[in-house]
Amino acid sequence: MLKMNSDLALLAPAKPFSAHLPIQFEGVHLSFGKHSIFSDLNLSIDGTGITAIMGPNGAGKSLILRLLADLIKPNKGCIHFNGLNQVPNEQIGFVFQRPVLLRRSVQDNLLHALAIAGVARGQRPFHADALLELGGMQHLAKSPARKLSGGEQQRLTLLRALAAKPGLLVLDEPSASLDPQATALIENIVLRASQCGVKVIVVTHDQGQASRLADEVIFVHKGRVHAIQATDEFLRTPASREAKAYLAGELLI
Ligand SMILES: Nc1ncnc2c1ncn2[C@@H]1O[C@H](COP(=O)(O)OP(=O)(O)OP(=O)(O)O)[C@@H](O)[C@H]1O
Ligand SMILES: [Mg+2]
């Protein structure tokens, strides 16, 4: 599946990411008004491989990603990485729950992302072509990005994130509401990025996706981490009652 040499040139992080260091949440508190979301959240995310975050709606999964990407600040506590108080912003590629694209062509969206990432002007068209090929989107290069189907938009959003050669790729439900084929295309790109040394954190409700992609699962419920387990183990014998109920499709209150 991996076209190693060309993929490495295209996807390998611009800067080596972590030297296997974990990303650590320490004593994180977050509230909105009187609504406390996290009180003393402590969490260590492996610095390599693919980590899935699972848990019911409203558990705090997206907020964990936002804290990690410094899009919101905790009221108390911090996120440590490699001796820093944040993962450096330029090292993170973020794919949000809903696609965010410019009102331009598919190709121009990629060229713009490459320009922001500091790729030399003369190199950008080659990178953009390689990304289009990676996403199977060459035939859509000139199409307006906002007219693409949901699956195509999500794929382009992922390619845009990868244009910056991030060390950490953060995906919030990248294939929610996509069909199996569109989902497989996204997963294939994510796996290739991971094989090129990109650390991936993906929020998903899809147990199949967790099992296809993730090395470990972090299960969150009501702002608390209930389990961190190797994926196979989590899916077979989840370490908490809440995780078991979630996997069985039971309503969690
Ligand atoms: N800006 C905000 N202001 C107030 N409350 C917020 C804000 N952002 C999130 N919340 C609340 O924090 C809780 C966790 O939200 P979050 O988006 O992290 O959930 P989630 O686990 O990603 O859920 P889903 O699976 O539905 O995407 C929810 O109760 C949500 O309403
Ligand atoms: Mg969410």
Image (cartoon, rainbow, N blue to C red):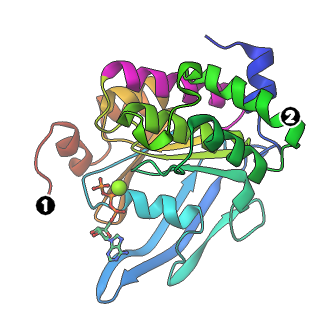
Q: Which residue is mark 1?
A: 253
> Residue 110: image x %, image y %?
65, 40
Q: What secondary structure is the magenta-colored segment mainly?
A: helix
Q: Left or right: 142 with respect to 206?
A: right
Q: Amino acid at mark 2?
A: Gln
Point 33% across, 80% down: residue: 36
Q: As displayed, is residue 88 above or below residue 153?
A: below
Q: Residue at the spot x=11%, y=44% of the render?
A: 250
Local packing at callout 1 (Cα closer than 10 Å; few below 14, some 14-19, many 20+) is few
Q: Is residue 212 found left or right of 74 in the rendered image? A: left
Marker disc for residue 245: none
Residue at the limit of the structure toward the bottom, as seen here: 34
Label of residue 123 in the image: 2
- Residue type for callout 1: Ile
- Label 2, label 1: how far apart the Cα atoms are: 52 Å
Q: Which residues are magenta?
A: 180-199
Between residues 149 and 6, which one lies in front from this camera angle?
149
Q: Is residue 3 visible?
A: yes
Q: Position of residue 197 (x, y in %)?
A: 72, 33
Q: Say whether marks 2 and 1 touch (CB < 8 Å).
A: no
